[in-house]
Amino acid sequence: MLRFLQTLVAVGISALSLYAAQKSYVAITNLQKYEERSERAAKHSETAAHELHKTRMTQGTSAAAICLSFLASVSLMLGASLGPPRAWEYVLPPLNLVAIAAAFVHNQNFWKAKAKVPFVGGFNEGIQKSKEIRQSLAVLGLAWAVVGVGGWIQG
């Protein structure tokens, strides 16, 4: 019964990961609209270059953690169909929890101080999507914690 519940949570994680990936894609594409201007500014300002680098790293970290979450949840669903849990099924949840938490903290530390800019809708939407990504990362982290605890109880 517990295995079935873990599989259901893994299905939910897959769906949420896809939802978060869509949000991440929109945030990245909105921020890329300002990439050329940002790169020009970075040539003349160390601060602008640092901000551009941090923006790219933050979005990339979140996207990578979301992709890892999706792949791991699919692996857990497939593993459930193979019979008793294998060692890697006990390792995936805590690894994903750590990856998701690291991406959340990285994203939070960078974007919490960013203010919306009047008349720059795409940039502001990128900030809003980044906030939504953080919310998705928080839910994914909680879901991975549930799967991990369930796996250890079952094992």
Image (spheres, grey):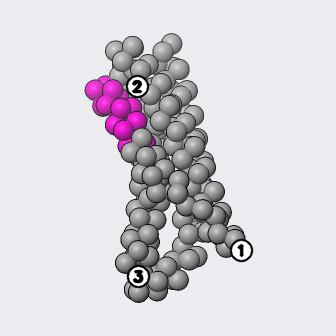
Q: What SS does tag 3 mark?
A: loop
* Mark 3 neighbour density, 10 Å: few (under 14) some (14–19) many (20 or more): few
Camera sees residue 118: yes
Residue 56 got which mark? none
Label 1 – label 2 distance at C-alpha: 45 Å
Q: Is residue 84 left or right of residue 127?
A: left
Name the amino acid, label 1.
Phe
**At which x and y percent is residue 8?**
55, 27
Q: Are marks 3 and 2 in contact (CB under 8 Å)?
A: no
Is 85 colored magenta in this rendering? no
Within 10 Å of the Cα at label 1, are there few (<14), some (14-19), or many (20+) other Cα atoms? few
Which mark is first along the chain, 2 or 3?
A: 3
Gap between marks 3 and 1 measured at Cα: 23 Å
Magenta range? 86-100
Percent position of residue 142, x then y: 50, 31
Return the mark for residue 148. 2
Q: Amino acid at mark 2?
A: Gly
Residue type, mark 3 in image? Ser
Mark on residue 119? Answer: 1
Alpha carbon separation for disc pair 3 and 2: 45 Å
Is the residue 5 above or below the residue 69 in the image?
Answer: above
- Which residue in the structure is indicated by mark 3? 45
Indicate yes or no whether the magenta region holds residue 99: yes
